[in-house]
Amino acid sequence: MPKGSSRNVTTASGDVLEIVPVDKIHGIFYSLIRDVGIEMNATLTLYRRFDGQWGTRGPNNTLTGMFSNVLKGEADLIAASVTMRVYRQRAMDFLVGQLMFLVH
């Protein structure tokens, strides 16, 4: 993908995501994911949801947004500052406090 350009993908569940060009990303979460990817010799693809959903409680206690993409296997992790909620913790694990050791 040319620098600065982006394209969209649609997941199997119908969510439309934007592949985010690396030159548009900054911050501690990106730095952490980038460094882990380098160490693991992994190829990273970063997405942004068009609907802006982070993960609210949907019908039948399902999760929407980024959380639904992880739970459906469409994404491997969420690299963002999100609020821990009981309904989210029942669905997946959170890293808490580990970032404080990386940034001193």
Image: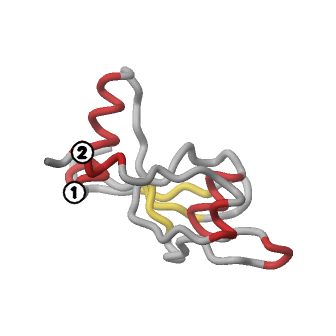
Residue 39 in the image, given as x and y percentages of width and height: 31, 23
Give the residue type that dot 1 points to: Gly
Where 51 falls versus 2 (above or below)?
below
The dot on residue 31 is 2
Callout 1: 10 Å neighbours few (<14), some, many (20+)? Answer: few
Q: Residue at x 34, y 32 (%)?
A: 36
Marks 2 and 1: CB-CB under 8 Å? yes
Q: In which quarter of the image is the N terminus?
A: top left
Q: Is residue 54 left or right of residue 104?
A: right
| Mark 1, residue position | 27
Q: Nearer the viewer, residue 51 or 27?
A: 27
Q: Which residue is drawn at 45% across and 55% down?
A: 47
Q: Nearer the viewer, residue 102 or 7?
A: 102
| SS under mark 1 | loop
Q: In which quarter of the image is residue 101?
A: top left
Q: In which quarter of the image is residue 35?
A: top left
Give the residue type that dot 2 points to: Ser
Residue 100 in the image, given as x and y percentages of width and height: 26, 51
Total marks shown come to 2
Q: Mark 2 and mark 1: span between their CA atoms?
A: 6 Å
